[in-house]
Image (cartoon, helix red, strand yellow):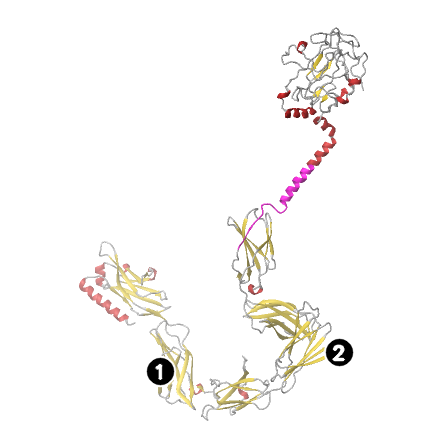
Amino acid sequence: MDLLPKALLLVLFLCALCGTSGSIDFCCGTIVPETPVLELGKEFTATCILSEYGRQYTRATADDISWMFRNVTVDRKYYTKINESAISITVNITEETKSPLKCNVISHVLSHPESKNVYGMLFTVGYPPEMPKNLSCWVLQSGDQLSHIMSCTWNPGARDPLLKTTYSLHARYYSTNISNMSIQKNYGELDFQTMPIYTTVTIQVEAENELGKVSSEVLYDPVNILKMNPPKNVKVTTEGFPTTLMVKWKRSINLPQLVLRHTIRFSAVGASVWSEIPVGDIPPENESFRLQNLQPYTDYVVQIRCMNTRDPMYWSEWSTNVTEKTPEDKPSSRPDLWRIIIPSEINSEKRVKLKWKDPLHSNGKILGYNLTITNRDKREILHMGPNEREYTLSSGKHNIRVTVTANNSVGISPPAVLTLNKEHPPVEAVTCVSQDEKLWVYWQLPNSTHVTEFLLEWEEAGQTVWQREPGSSRSAVLKGNFLPFKFYNISVYPLYQSVPGKPYTVGAYLKQGVPLMSPALKVEKSGKNEIELEWSPIPLEKRQGFIVNYIIFYEDSKGERKSEVIGPEVYTYKLKSLASNAKYDVWIIPSTIAGPSQESSRLTVTTRQYAVGEIEAIVVSVCIGFLFLTVMTMAVCINKNKMIKKHIWPQVPDPSNSTIANWSPDFPSRPASPKEGSMTDVSVVEVDIFDKKSMNEEMLKKDKYSSEEHSSGIGGSSCMSSPRQSVSDCDEGDSGQTTASTVQYSSVVASGYKGQTPASLPPFIRSESTQPLLDSEERPEDLHVQEGSGHLPAHRNPRHPYFRRPWAVSEDNPLNLQQIEIGEQNSSSLGFCPVEEGSQQTTPTTENVPAAGSASSGPSYMPQASGYRPQ
């Protein structure tokens, strides 16, 4: 506020300077009215007036004037044009209205218009003071007299004026005016040199600031505002009665004309509620009073105060505390008796611990307890000391009646009775909730209506604690020292006279928090597309609340995360629809109503490539298929064995068992011997001859064994299967036949029919067939004579080992007898031995065969009339 005059002087100085220098800033007009304080919520009107000089120099009119609060331009809708040189604005003042208020004008002197400031006004905003209310004054007692200082308080109002406001007290009595400027906005003092008593005095408080002044209502007659000191010398004494105390005091002021009233309040030590004696129960002239209906042997705190009876406006303060204990009396209530069942795993006999508390109204110091145990006809009385408050016994199977009494120096308490081994129905639907940092228990009455009271039980710091509630109660606040985040088991027992009912137990937390830990996961089973997880419950001290659910998170190697929400009582879970042979990170988070716990350590698991039993199923399937195929193959082989044997192992006749030689011809079996020097035409089987020395012994052996697999010739057999010595016997070593030779068959064909002698010798007809003999060999009646000649039967004649033909023999003349050399046999006999693969063919020989180069016209064999003869 001190800056405002200085600012105005600065503006005037600039305007004066403008008249001499020709400047157009700050000297072209003014703002009227120039108000330094504006009231909030009210409209304010200001006018900007251009001077004659300003109009000429700037060539501006009222249309070129604009208004600004600080840097905010006022909308032209609030403008009012008064004339060509003045314009006004009317705005509502708010807290957003910022100082200063400026009037600007657009100058047209230069080539382009330019805004110039004409005038500015600094201001503050605020409210006028509110009228003070509830003015009250009092005069305190100083010593034995009244003080000359009057103290007053008032309510200055809820609105802050935002301006400096002063408050002053004014008092008037007779022709004396007393005033005092207060430095506080709601408290002040007036100094009376002598306090006027029973004199009319008017008192007011006045509030003033730059926006106005206001006064409170007038307060009259200060004699009614006397406030005494509390009574002095307060004493409390006993009178020998256990339920009364005597209170005595003295007046605090020495003014006989003042009549005082007194009141007393008292309470037991530690109690939060005071009991107060009504004002009318204590006569004004009394200075003592007897307190009655108190509890025996109880410490009481007593206080007293007083006030003027003429106009009871102000009570004195309460006197200081005075404590006294009432005398003893015999206990008026019974001990609080209860039992705790001790669990026993070894001994089947139930053990019970009896516990009791002092009577609620012990009315004195407890000197001991009397415990009486009645078991059927047996009665036992025990005297316990004052600090012995529990006893353990075996309850057995029969009902036991327990009675406890307490005694002090005056008498014995009523008995507390409890019956063991007998239980009645429990309460129904117990709930426990936390409200206002207290545990409230609610229950419903059981079907039986004979409940006398309820007992609530829980544990604190390892000790069993209980409290009793009346039988009409349906709820109770537990009176215990409960800690947040700790679990408590609350049990409610209905009591039927002395018989307790069955308990109903619920869990409770005073306050719940997030779990301190998460359970550790472990893999119970792992499959191809699923994993079974298992975890243990969180320890009770780590839960800090009721677990509402578990959330299992699992994340694959690609970072794709999924979750499953599980109930609080589930401790195994199977994750399904997983990829096979894939790695997953799995973790679990438990939650309470306060929120989830911190993330636990992750468990890395890998699913199987094959499901459990899948490999075994494949192996079993393959084995079963193979077994089925084998069984089917064996069945087919057994069923078709003849056909298979025929295709794989053809039937080869054994020449040693042949009966061809025994067939009987219809004509002499031996024709006339040819003349000496002649030889029957023969058909020579050409074989490759190997020198014995050039043949590997191993090859011979191999040929020997291989010869068993082939057979050839009519009546021929392998050298290994023939029981007779043949020309192809492997033991001779000089045979030139090998198993690599083609199987050849030789037959003697007669040139005549039925005894007719042909003109020439029948030649041996060479056969290149490799097929085995037909079955008709055993059935000669099925054979047919081909080309008019029959087959001749063979005869068992001595055989020559082989024919040897020199290497020079030509294929064109195979029968050149000049080249045939007969060795190791008589020149008169002739034999044939086919030599294919070690097989031998027995052919009959003729006797007295001429020497080489001679010819014979007689045949070696005569044809049979009917081919082969059946054996």
Q: Position of residue 61 (x, y in %)?
A: 26, 59
In magenta segment, residue 627 = yes
Q: Residue at x 26, y 68 (%)?
A: 7
Q: Residue furthest left?
A: 20
Front position among marks 2 and 1: 2
Q: Secondary structure at mark 2?
A: loop
Work out whether 284 lies above or below 774: below
Relative depth, front residue between 420 and 738: 738
Instruction: Give the residue at mark 1.
Output: 180
Q: Residue at x 63, y 19 (%)?
A: 691
Instruction: Give the residue at mark 2.
Output: 377
**Distance (Cα) linking label 2 and label 1:** 92 Å
Q: Residue furthest top?
A: 759
Q: Earlier in the sequence, mark 2 or mark 1?
A: 1
Q: Secondary structure at mark 1?
A: strand
Q: Amino acid at mark 1?
A: Asn
Relative depth, front residue between 565 and 103: 565
Report if the CB atoms under discs 2 and 1 are less than 8 Å apart.
no
Q: Is residue 554 left or right of residue 746?
A: left
Q: Position of residue 309 (x, y in %)?
A: 49, 88
Q: Which disc is residue 435 wearing? A: none
Q: Position of residue 681 (x, y in %)?
A: 71, 10
Q: Amino acid at mark 2?
A: Asp
Relative depth, front residue between 582 and 112: 582
Work out whether 814 lies above or below 60: above
User: Which region is colored magenta?
Assistant: 602-628
Quadrant housing the C terminus: top right
Q: Position of residue 25 (x, y in %)?
A: 23, 62
Q: Residue at x 68, y 26 (%)?
A: 705
